[in-house]
Every structure is written in C-alpha cells, then in structure tokens.
Image: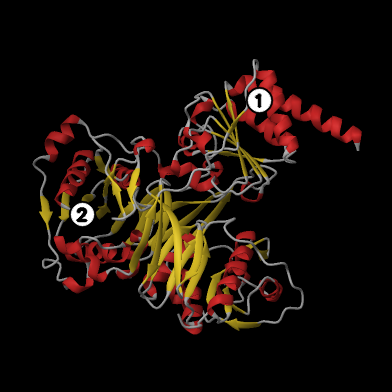
Amino acid sequence: MSARGILVVAELAAGRPSSVSRELLGLAQRIVEQTGGPVGAVCPGADAEAAAELVAHGADRVYTAGDTELADYDSDAWTACAAWAARAMDPNAVLAAHTTSGADLAPRLAFRLEAAAATGCLGVEVEDGTLRFTRPCYGGNARETVSFNTRLAVATVRGGCSEALPREAGRQGETVRVSLDRAALRARTVERRRESGGDVRLEEARVVVAGGRGLNGPEGFEVLGELARELNGALGASRVPCDLGWCPHSMQIGLTGKTVTPDLYIAVGISGAGHHMAGCGRARNIVAINSDPEAAIYKDARWGVVGDYRKLIPPLIAAIRELRAASAARN
Amino acid sequence: MHIVVCAKQVPDPEAAFSMFRVDEQAKKVIPAPGLRMVMSPFDAQALEASLRVREAAGEVRITVMSLGTESARAAVKHGLAMGADDGVLLADAAFEDGDAYTTARVLAAAIGKLGDCDLVLTGRQAADWDAGIVGSGIAELLHMPVVTFAREVKIGNGTVRVERVVENGCDVIEAPLPAVVTVSNELGAARAPSLRETMRAARKPVLAWSAADLGLPPGEIGAKGARRVLERLFEPVKRGACEMVAGATPEEKGQKLAQCLLEAQLL
C-alpha cells in the first residue's frame, strides 16, 4: 500500500470536533504510523478555531469550505466537499463516523470516486499492507472482515472503537480551502427538529441504563430513569420499545440505532439479540436484569440478575444510595 | 407518477438467533433448518411508504423490483400482494456473488430501462449484510439526489419531502424529483398482504430481465465486478463469564449487585 494517508470526515459538536471525530483522527494517526502518509480532515463548516482543534487532535491538513452554515450536515454539500478533498489528497482511505451523517455520506462518496464502502465498522487494521475493515452483519449475529480492490476505500466507524490522541496545543497543520460548487446542492434541509433529550448525552454517557421488550410498557422507563439519574447516566432502549412507541427513537441503541461504549451498561428486559449487542457490546461492564434465566444477554454480561425488574430496581437504587453514603462517611 | 421500490429477499431476520451459524471456511451463513426467506423488513417498509404516497397522491404506479436468484420471485410477489402494480425480477447467474456496487449497478440499469421513474424507494439497509449502500449508490449512478433514513415520505409539486431521522430528532428535507429515498424503521410497520390483493397479485405482470437485457457486460457485474473482497465471516465471541447474582429476595439481589458494582469501582 502506497503512503497516501488517511482522510477523516470530521463532524463538529458545538463548534468543536465531536468525540467520535477525535477518535477517528487518533485511528488515522495509528494507521499512518504503519503505512506512512498524512492525516487529512475534511470539515465543511470548520472556522479557523475548529480547524486548529482538528490539527491539535491529529490532523495534518484540514479541508474546509469555511462556511459555518455547513457546520450541520448537508448531504449534497458535505459529499461534494469530501469528494473535492479526497481528489486533492488522494488518500488510501476516507474514514467517517458511523452517525446518520457519515452513514449517508460514505456510500455516496464511494460511488462518486469509483471506490467501495464498509459501513458501521468496529475495527480498521493494516494487515500485510492492506486495510481491512471488520463490521457487524446479519443483524449483529455475524462479523465480516473485508478489504477492497479499489484505489480508495471508504468506511464509517462506530464510536468507541478507537482512542482519541491527547490534545496537543500548538501542533502544526495547514488549512486548505475547498471550493464548493453550489450548483451541486439539490436536496434542501428546510427544517431541523431537535428533541430536548435527557441531561446526559447517550453516546458519551459513562453509565447507560437501557430497557427492552421485557419492560412490558412505557412505565418501565420511569423506573429505569430513576436508576439512571442515581448513577448520573443516560437512558437507552433496544429497538422494540422504540417501535412500540414506549420511548423516543432517539433512545435506540443497536445496529440501526446508536452505538454506546459506557463503563457500565445496565440492560433491563433486553434479550440480547445480535442487532442490539452491535450497539452496546463494547461496553466495559454489562449488567443483565431479565425475568428469563435463559436470556442470551447473560452470555455478554459480567453480572446477571434473574427476576422482575419492578421488584429489583427499587432495592438496587436504595442499596446504591446506602453504599455511597457509607463510603462518603468513611472518606 | 411512477415509484420503483427495490426490495431484497433475505433469510428471515426474526428467526431465533440461537439458530444462527456461520461456515467460516466457506465464508457463508449456514441456513437453519426450516428458515424462511422473506422480503427484507426495511424494504417492506419502503413499499409501505410507496403505498402511503399513492393513498395521498392518487395516480401512482408502483413497481417492485428485486435482484437475486429465481427464489426472489417470492419477494416480488409479496410486494405485489402488498399492493404494488407490477414487478421486475432480476435473476441471472451473472449477477451472483456481487457486492453493493454491482447490485446498485444492476438496479440502476434496470431503473434506467424502465425509463419513467420519478422516485426510487428502498430500505435503509438489507437485513443480511446490513450495509446501507445500495440506495445511495443507485442515486449516484443515476445522478439523482438521495435522502436516507426516512420516517415519512410525501410528494408534491415535483419534489419529495422527507422527514429524515437523525441522532436527536429529524431533518425535514426537500429534493427535486426524480430522487432516491431510503426508508428507516421509524416509518412504522408495513401492512400485511390482504387475501384480496394476494389473489390479484397472481395476475399482475412480472418482467424478468437478464444481464444481456440490461446491456451489462459480464465482466462488470457479479463476482467479477465486485469491489469488496470478503476476507472473513465469523460469529462474534461472547464474553461468557457472567456472574449470576443470586438472593432469596429482590432486596438481597439488589444489595449484592450494588456491592459488586461498588467493588468494581463503578459507583
């Protein structure tokens, strides 16, 4: 593999590189350590400050249209900017976050540049000089490792699959201005509706309490919400409660929902199907609470409790409070 | 108005995942005994979206199109029984062992051959490879705008208006027709075929096109045209070291679990 480098499609959150974008810059730097070449970041809405942050987190070169209106994802504009940057840089691979933005952009970019894409990757490795991408398929029941016979590979990578580099203030990098052909913009975003959501962002929460079909109704999320608040965590769900309207779809964790990698994942009434585990399997510690002693989730869990969550969660919350109070008293 | 819905036939994803096995040597999934083949659920929801457009807009012809082996005819028939007007089956040995790229090439060629398509709908991803590439690929190949992850699709004044699911809400996007839209599960359940429609479906026309019919050179499709190289297919490793927290009462279980979390410094 020639040393052409890696181009990262970077997203911003409140004007700064998002956590998964920082992780991708770290991943790209680890890849070019083996392959050589630069790390680029294309971020259509980056201003000078955001560009400097991207450099501080590992970008050697930032491609931006310099238009803060493009900070929010726009499929046509971002795809055009990414294609422009990829043509200018000619990297070995383009890596985007596996968000609704990256998952939209990557296939379009791949087709436009006569390349191919691997979406929702859990890992990207250099093996025998070739980039290999590992991703879940068959509803999370299987993993495939793929490579590409094209000059360019495009991939989206799930959050929590690699570590960001420590921020290095004063790191040197250049900024390249992308020229965006506005005639390429056909689909228009006329409105952006946002839910107010919980206090803790699901993707960045250190503790996630998630409920599944086994909650048997929307009231279950009130019980889980109390536990989540006690642990300063976020509330999530498997797909069934979202589809049944028990909770908003923005809480969905799994193959077609969000990917979370908390220190503690408490799965309540979740059977543990592959499509759900694809979104939470990388949590450091999983607690499974289920009324079915045969539930598959126990195979992925560190601790399992069998029983009715309605009877288990209140004493669990009480015990957590007690233990914390005792440990605070000792200190 | 002519809508083409691209629908793939897949092993039933609702089948018990405990039955799921992979042949790592052959890099293939071992079909569980009695496993049904069904229309991929997101594609069924794309077809549902097309039916809702027809119910709202009137004069809409819906074509359901499937690329696969001859068995994919059942997916086309399912689409017709749900309410599509006609079907296209793309079954040719030359298409086999392709990837998302060659699949999009073949579907784009078939949509081009139909000639009068205003809107292409398909699922956000197929329930087997879960890639979510083909819909956007068709759009790029046909130079159409694309909107992904739709939870609502409406047509009016030569544009498609889509509510597109994003992490914490939705974007409302308008694109000029012809366009491609991929549909997400948030759209809601696809209707089951009624007996009446199933009876009618038997008389609806199904075109069958080969690679030659589409003017596609054999070297550019199927395994020969694929850009993806499948290196490995395997089952994820389960952690398999679960400590069951037992107790005579829920209170005891709760206390023990809290103790475990404290000792692991997770509180």
Of B43 and A144, nearer the camera is A144
Q: Secondary structure at mark 2?
A: loop
Q: Which residue of the protein is positioned furthest toward the top in this rendering? A: B248
The quarter of the picture where residue A36 lies is bottom right
Q: Which residue sits at x=68%, y=65%?
A: A16
B224 on left or right of A172: left
Disc 2 from disc 1: Cα separation: 49 Å
Badge 1 sits on which subunit? Answer: A
Question: Which amino acid, by three-letter code, is at mark 1?
Answer: Ile
Q: Secondary structure at mark 1?
A: helix
Check the image and report above or below for B36 versus A1: above
Residue B13 in picture, x, y percent from top left = 34, 41
Quadrant the C terminus of chain B occupies? top right
Q: Which residue sits at x=39%, y=63%?
A: A146
Q: Which residue sits at x=56%, y=42%?
A: A251
Residue A31 in picture, x, y percent from top left = 55, 72
Residue under numbered circle 1 = A313
Residue under numbered circle 2 = B68
B132 on left or right of A43: left
B244 on left or right of A315: left
For the residues bearing labels 2 and 1, Cβ distance under 8 angstroms: no
Check the image and report above or below for A322 versus A16: above
